[in-house]
Amino acid sequence: MTMVGDGSGAAGAGDADTADSADSADSALAALGAELDASIADLESARQRVLELQELRSRGLGWREIVPQENRPLIVESVTRALDGLGAVGGRFRREEAVALHGEGETIAGIGRLFGVSRQRVSAYLQEHAQVEAGRAAGQAGAEDVAGAEDVAGAGDVAGAGDAASPSTSAERTPSEHVPSSSEHPSSGHPSAEHTPTGAGPPV
Protein backbone atom coordinates (compact mmCIF):
# COMPACT_ATOMS: atom_id res chain seq x y z
CA MET A 1 0.00 0.00 0.00
CA THR A 2 1.31 3.44 -0.89
CA MET A 3 1.33 5.80 2.07
CA VAL A 4 0.53 9.44 1.35
CA GLY A 5 2.53 11.82 3.52
CA ASP A 6 1.00 14.87 5.10
CA GLY A 7 3.74 17.16 3.76
CA SER A 8 4.98 18.02 7.24
CA GLY A 9 8.55 17.14 6.29
CA ALA A 10 8.55 19.49 3.30
CA ALA A 11 6.89 22.18 5.37
CA GLY A 12 9.50 21.78 8.08
CA ALA A 13 12.29 22.14 5.54
CA GLY A 14 10.65 25.26 4.16
CA ASP A 15 10.35 26.75 7.63
CA ALA A 16 14.04 26.03 8.26
CA ASP A 17 15.03 27.73 5.01
CA THR A 18 12.94 30.77 5.91
CA ALA A 19 14.54 30.96 9.35
CA ASP A 20 18.03 30.69 7.84
CA SER A 21 17.23 33.50 5.39
CA ALA A 22 15.99 35.69 8.22
CA ASP A 23 19.12 34.95 10.26
CA SER A 24 21.32 35.88 7.29
CA ALA A 25 19.44 39.14 6.83
CA ASP A 26 19.77 39.94 10.55
CA SER A 27 23.50 39.23 10.42
CA ALA A 28 23.92 41.43 7.35
CA LEU A 29 21.94 44.20 9.08
CA ALA A 30 24.23 44.04 12.12
CA ALA A 31 27.29 44.23 9.85
CA LEU A 32 25.81 47.25 8.10
CA GLY A 33 25.28 48.97 11.44
CA ALA A 34 28.90 48.36 12.44
CA GLU A 35 30.15 49.63 9.09
CA LEU A 36 28.03 52.75 9.42
CA ASP A 37 29.57 53.48 12.81
CA ALA A 38 33.08 53.10 11.38
CA SER A 39 32.21 55.21 8.34
CA ILE A 40 30.71 57.96 10.48
CA ALA A 41 33.94 58.13 12.47
CA ASP A 42 35.98 58.32 9.26
CA LEU A 43 33.73 61.00 7.78
CA GLU A 44 33.75 63.07 10.96
CA SER A 45 37.53 62.98 10.88
CA ALA A 46 37.49 64.01 7.23
CA ARG A 47 35.05 66.83 7.99
CA GLN A 48 37.33 68.12 10.74
CA ARG A 49 40.23 68.06 8.33
CA VAL A 50 38.20 70.10 5.82
CA LEU A 51 37.74 72.80 8.46
CA GLU A 52 41.46 72.77 9.20
CA LEU A 53 42.33 73.16 5.53
CA GLN A 54 39.87 76.01 5.16
CA GLU A 55 41.51 77.73 8.12
CA LEU A 56 44.97 77.32 6.61
CA ARG A 57 43.77 78.65 3.27
CA SER A 58 42.22 81.68 5.00
CA ARG A 59 45.67 82.49 6.35
CA GLY A 60 47.03 82.68 2.85
CA LEU A 61 48.96 79.39 2.77
CA GLY A 62 49.35 77.76 -0.63
CA TRP A 63 48.50 74.15 -1.44
CA ARG A 64 52.19 73.31 -1.88
CA GLU A 65 52.67 74.35 1.72
CA ILE A 66 49.60 72.58 3.07
CA VAL A 67 49.43 69.21 1.34
CA PRO A 68 52.96 67.93 2.20
CA GLN A 69 52.15 68.51 5.87
CA GLU A 70 48.93 66.50 5.87
CA ASN A 71 48.73 63.34 7.94
CA ARG A 72 47.34 60.09 6.58
CA PRO A 73 44.68 59.16 5.83
CA LEU A 74 44.01 62.07 3.53
CA ILE A 75 40.50 63.44 3.19
CA VAL A 76 39.85 61.67 -0.09
CA GLU A 77 41.24 58.40 1.33
CA SER A 78 38.86 58.56 4.30
CA VAL A 79 35.87 59.29 2.09
CA THR A 80 36.79 56.53 -0.38
CA ARG A 81 37.24 53.97 2.37
CA ALA A 82 33.87 54.87 3.89
CA LEU A 83 32.06 54.67 0.55
CA ASP A 84 33.70 51.37 -0.44
CA GLY A 85 32.88 49.78 2.91
CA LEU A 86 29.28 50.95 2.85
CA GLY A 87 28.85 49.82 -0.75
CA ALA A 88 30.04 46.28 -0.02
CA VAL A 89 28.14 45.80 3.25
CA GLY A 90 25.06 47.59 1.96
CA GLY A 91 24.98 45.36 -1.11
CA ARG A 92 25.17 42.27 1.08
CA PHE A 93 22.28 43.50 3.20
CA ARG A 94 20.14 44.24 0.15
CA ARG A 95 20.80 40.73 -1.17
CA GLU A 96 19.99 38.98 2.11
CA GLU A 97 16.92 41.16 2.61
CA ALA A 98 15.62 40.09 -0.81
CA VAL A 99 16.25 36.44 0.04
CA ALA A 100 14.41 36.81 3.36
CA LEU A 101 11.43 38.45 1.66
CA HIS A 102 11.33 35.73 -0.97
CA GLY A 103 11.55 33.07 1.74
CA GLU A 104 8.53 34.62 3.45
CA GLY A 105 6.48 34.35 0.28
CA GLU A 106 7.05 37.67 -1.49
CA THR A 107 7.25 37.39 -5.27
CA ILE A 108 10.23 38.52 -7.30
CA ALA A 109 8.10 41.21 -8.92
CA GLY A 110 6.92 42.35 -5.50
CA ILE A 111 10.48 42.58 -4.20
CA GLY A 112 11.45 44.58 -7.28
CA ARG A 113 8.68 47.06 -6.55
CA LEU A 114 9.73 47.37 -2.91
CA PHE A 115 13.36 47.97 -3.81
CA GLY A 116 12.70 50.04 -6.91
CA VAL A 117 14.69 47.67 -9.13
CA SER A 118 13.90 45.31 -11.97
CA ARG A 119 12.84 41.68 -11.61
CA GLN A 120 16.13 40.71 -13.26
CA ARG A 121 18.04 42.49 -10.52
CA VAL A 122 16.07 40.67 -7.82
CA SER A 123 16.74 37.34 -9.55
CA ALA A 124 20.43 38.23 -9.55
CA TYR A 125 20.26 38.83 -5.77
CA LEU A 126 18.78 35.37 -5.25
CA GLN A 127 21.34 33.73 -7.53
CA GLU A 128 24.20 35.51 -5.77
CA HIS A 129 22.91 34.24 -2.43
CA ALA A 130 22.71 30.66 -3.74
CA GLN A 131 26.26 30.88 -5.07
CA VAL A 132 27.59 32.23 -1.77
CA GLU A 133 25.85 29.46 0.18
CA ALA A 134 27.11 26.79 -2.23
CA GLY A 135 30.67 28.07 -1.90
CA ARG A 136 30.37 28.12 1.88
CA ALA A 137 29.04 24.55 1.94
CA ALA A 138 31.83 23.38 -0.36
CA GLY A 139 34.40 25.03 1.89
CA GLN A 140 32.98 23.33 4.98
CA ALA A 141 32.87 19.97 3.23
CA GLY A 142 36.48 20.40 2.11
CA ALA A 143 37.56 21.25 5.64
CA GLU A 144 35.77 18.17 6.98
CA ASP A 145 37.40 15.99 4.32
CA VAL A 146 40.84 17.30 5.26
CA ALA A 147 40.14 16.72 8.95
CA GLY A 148 38.91 13.18 8.22
CA ALA A 149 42.00 12.42 6.14
CA GLU A 150 44.23 13.70 8.94
CA ASP A 151 42.40 11.50 11.45
CA VAL A 152 42.84 8.44 9.23
CA ALA A 153 46.50 9.25 8.67
CA GLY A 154 47.02 9.73 12.40
CA ALA A 155 45.38 6.40 13.18
CA GLY A 156 47.61 4.73 10.59
CA ASP A 157 50.70 6.30 12.15
CA VAL A 158 49.69 5.04 15.59
CA ALA A 159 49.06 1.56 14.23
CA GLY A 160 52.39 1.57 12.41
CA ALA A 161 54.19 2.65 15.58
CA GLY A 162 52.52 -0.17 17.49
CA ASP A 163 53.60 -2.70 14.88
CA ALA A 164 57.17 -1.44 15.03
CA ALA A 165 57.22 -1.64 18.82
CA SER A 166 55.82 -5.21 18.88
CA PRO A 167 57.31 -7.16 15.96
CA SER A 168 55.72 -10.45 15.07
CA THR A 169 57.46 -13.46 16.58
CA SER A 170 55.97 -15.95 14.17
CA ALA A 171 59.23 -16.15 12.23
CA GLU A 172 61.18 -16.85 15.43
CA ARG A 173 59.00 -19.69 16.59
CA THR A 174 60.39 -23.24 16.25
CA PRO A 175 57.75 -25.75 15.32
CA SER A 176 57.25 -28.20 18.19
CA GLU A 177 58.33 -31.75 17.49
CA HIS A 178 55.43 -34.03 16.87
CA VAL A 179 55.45 -37.20 18.92
CA PRO A 180 53.23 -39.74 17.31
CA SER A 181 50.84 -41.62 19.54
CA SER A 182 50.90 -45.37 19.95
CA SER A 183 48.10 -45.68 17.45
CA GLU A 184 50.25 -43.90 14.89
CA HIS A 185 53.25 -46.33 15.23
CA PRO A 186 53.60 -48.54 12.20
CA SER A 187 53.09 -52.20 12.90
CA SER A 188 56.45 -53.87 13.69
CA GLY A 189 55.18 -57.47 13.57
CA HIS A 190 55.71 -57.89 17.30
CA PRO A 191 52.78 -57.92 19.67
CA SER A 192 52.85 -55.46 22.46
CA ALA A 193 53.35 -56.57 26.03
CA GLU A 194 49.66 -56.20 26.76
CA HIS A 195 48.55 -58.23 23.75
CA THR A 196 47.49 -61.86 24.38
CA PRO A 197 48.05 -64.12 21.35
CA THR A 198 44.88 -65.58 19.92
CA GLY A 199 44.36 -69.27 20.65
CA ALA A 200 46.62 -69.46 23.70
CA GLY A 201 44.78 -71.26 26.48
CA PRO A 202 45.28 -70.91 30.17
CA PRO A 203 48.31 -72.72 31.69
CA VAL A 204 47.69 -76.37 32.69
Image (cartoon, helix red, strand yellow):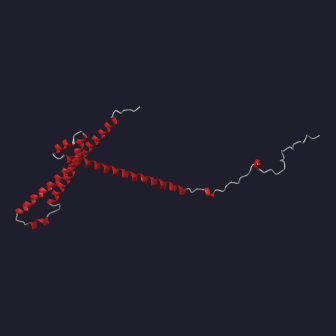
- Residue drawn where x is 7% and y is 62% of the image: 56
- Residue drawn where x is 51% and y is 56% of the image: 160
Q: How many marks?
A: 0
- Residue drawn where x is 50% and y is 54% of the image: 159
Q: For residue 21, which quarter of the picture?
A: top left
Q: For residue 105, which quarter of the picture?
A: top left
- Establish if 94 lies above or below 7: below
Instruction: Name the spot of residue 95 as percent of width and height, x first.
Output: 22, 47
Extreme-top residue of the structure: 1
- Establish if 4 lies above or below 44: above
Instruction: Name the spot of residue 26 as percent of width and height, x first.
Output: 24, 44
In this orientation, which residue lies closer to the viewer: 106 or 87? 106
Extreme-bottom residue of the structure: 64
In this orientation, which residue lies closer to the viewer: 67 or 173? 173
Instruction: Name the spot of residue 28 as percent of width and height, x first.
Output: 23, 47
- Residue drawn where x is 39% and y is 52% of the image: 145
Q: Quadrant of the C terminus?
A: top right
- Establish if 130 lies above or below 78: above
Horizontal side of 63 relative to 154 (left or right) equals left
Q: Quadrant of the N terminus?
A: top left
Horizontal side of 95 relative to 203 (left or right) equals left
Instruction: Name the spot of residue 9 as percent of width and height, x first.
Output: 34, 36
